[in-house]
Structures are given as C-alpha cells and as structure tokens.
Amino acid sequence: MKYTLLIAALLIVSLYIPAISSPHEDYIEKYKHLAIAEMERTNIPASITLAQGLHESALGKSELATLANNHFGIKCHKGWQGDYFFKKDDDTDEHGNLIKSCFRSYPSAEESYKDHSEFLMTRPWYAPLFDLEKSDYKGWAYGLKDAGYATDPKYPQKLIASIEKWKLYKYDKVQSVPDIARPVFDREPHIIFSPPVVFAVNDVKVILAKNGDTPIQLAQRTDVELKRILEYNERLTYPDQNLIHNERVFIQQKKKEYKKGAKYHRVQPGEDLYTISQWYGIRLENLAKRNRMHPSGVPLTGEIIKLKGRKFKKSKSPKWNFQLKPSVSPRPSSDKFHTVKAGENLYMISRKYNISVKKIIKYNNLNGDTIFAGQVLRIS
C-alpha cells in the first residue's frame, strides 16, 4: 500500500514538471511561426527555412544571431542599405589572408526571416527553386547548394538530415497563427523579365532566358548586338535557336578564369564543360585548355575541374589533343606509361602496377590526386 501511494504521488508530480527539451526543439518552437508565415507569403517551405536557421545560426547562439539578429548568414552584398556587422568568414585579401566580411544586421529575428525570403525571391539564380512543389524539401536543399547559397559540399545533406530528424516537414502543411501579417505576394516575381533582369556572375553581366526565347529576341531586349551574344555564349550558334527556361545568357565577354574564391569544381551528374563555364562565367576555350580537355568534352561525374590558376604549357598539351603527353621530361624507353581510363583513380592504378600512389604523383609532378580519362601517366 505504501509503495502504491508513492508511485501515485510521483505520477501526479510528473504531470506538473515540464519535459526537458533540446536546444534544437527550443529553436524550432521559438521561430516556427515565422517560418510558416514566410512560407504562406513566399511559398518557401517552412522546413527549409527552419533547417537553414538551425544550421546557419548555430541554434540561435552564433555571434551573428546574438549580436546582429542574422539567422541565415546573409552578407551585405551590393545595394544593402540597412545596418551591418563585421566578422571574419571566408573573404581574403590579395595575399590570401582572412579579412572581415560585411554581414547584414537586423533589429529583430523576424526581420532576418523576412529578409531571407526576399533574398531568395530577388536573386534570379534562385528562381528555379520556386517551380518546385512546396513539399519537395530535398529539391530545395540541393537547389540552394547548386545556386551557390553555401560552399559546404554537404550542405544539402545537412539540411535534409535536420528536416527529417526533427520532422520539420510537418510545418510545410500548416497555416500560420492569426496574428502574423501576410503581405500580398506576386507568385512569380522573378521569372517575369521585361526588360530582362541583369545580374553578375564572375563580375560579368548575365540574364536568364524564358522558355522559347531566342538569341535575336534577347539582343533586341538588351540592346546588345546579336553577334556578341552568340560570341559570348559558345553554344548559341544561330539567331532563332530556342532557349530553355532560366538558361544563363551572358551579355558581356566571360572571364578567362574564375575571379572569386573557389579554385575547383566537382562535376555533378549531367554537367559538361559548357555547363560549368556558364555557371562560373569562364570562357569555354580557357576552361578546356586549363583542364587539358576538348571544349565539347564531358568530364566524369565527381571529377575535379580547375577554375583558375596556371595554364598547362602548349608543348605539354597540344590544342585539343586527346592523347596527352606525359607531364614529365623524356625518359629512356624502359619507362612505362599508363593511359587513364574512365572511372580509374590513382589507387586503382597503383594496385595494378604495384607502385605507391605517392610515387605516381612524384613521377608525374601531379598537384594532388586528381586525374582524368585520357591522361598519360608514367608509372616506372
């Protein structure tokens, strides 16, 4: 009887003791209504907004979040007229030293959430995301990475993991609380280009085409000569060529190399050299030469493409020569060479010839372990 009364008392007490929540749950509970309200206003999934907030603000405890109410790591960028906050991030000077970056500062977290939506809505390169279903949080996660929101290669996986662990997808199906205002939103403000919206990639002016646009139509709408548009975009070859929705069309000559931070690009499924050249604003010919490839070449998925830096010497890489010469000085005929096949890596080759990866790198003066199909390597 005594034990029965004790258990009953403990059960009663437990009803009045709140469950201990995790920092993740605290953040979600505190800001979910803002994410839902922004979803209703802009159609950006609440799950994506919350997952980004969790990640970018370190659960609301980052320096940016606590001192500048910036929950999404958005930098000032050209045209920002609000307050700002300086801290070191990933910007460097000409010597490669980290310097302080300018971040947006807000009077409240609510303003940060609203500006996050506006930031995505007003950048044309995020426009394809708004064609996705609101429930497609995976498409949004990978689309944000592809559009350049983050440099972390695991960014999509991290967002998806948070959404699924904390069941954030359930907020994509609910409505906001009544006291949150819902400003009127034009459903497709970023795909109505009349005249076309001009933005910059690698400090070069570019526009996004609408489905069915042609080079001659864009020439008329931008006051750029047709021959220039065809010259700047190497795969546009005739005036009435049909373009696809959100295809990038440069209206200035692209650069010879990428001027921003990234030095390399890892090839994604379906990408070729032209796709990569358009993404980074690099002339196709220069990108091909830098990577010892033909301009129409299709690199392997996962292959590393060099975006900047020293070009290969012509003597070691004849123009568009698929059978490349080894990048070493001539050796006696006793030396052995291997032509890299599609899908091979240095480890596989080292096992085949019973030689260490380190020696292959040394023999061929390689800068790291990146190789490509058709490359000739000395292996003894």
Image: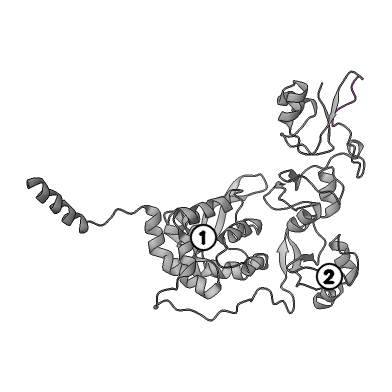
Which mark is nearer the camera, 2 or 1?
2
**Which residue of the protein is positioned furthest toward the bottom in this rendering?**
184
SS at mark 2 in the image: loop
Describe residue 338's horizontal placement relative to residue 27 as left or right.
Answer: right
Q: As shown in the figure, which amino acid type bears the numbered disc 1? A: Phe
Identify the magenta region.
327-332
Q: Tell me the residue at 79%/52% (across/down).
A: 272
**Which residue of the protein is positioned furthest toward the left in this rendering?**
2
Identify the mark nearer the N-term, 2 or 1.
Answer: 1
Name the spot of residue 218 as percent of width and height, x first.
82, 74
Name the spot of residue 153 as percent of width and height, x first.
61, 48
Name the spot of residue 118 as percent of width and height, x first.
56, 70
SS at mark 1 in the image: loop
In the foreground, 293 or 224: 293
Residue 207 lies, with reference to residue 146, above or below; the image says: below
Query: Residue 352's image quarter?
Result: top right
In the rendering, which numbered label is found on residue 242? 2
Residue behind mark 1: 72
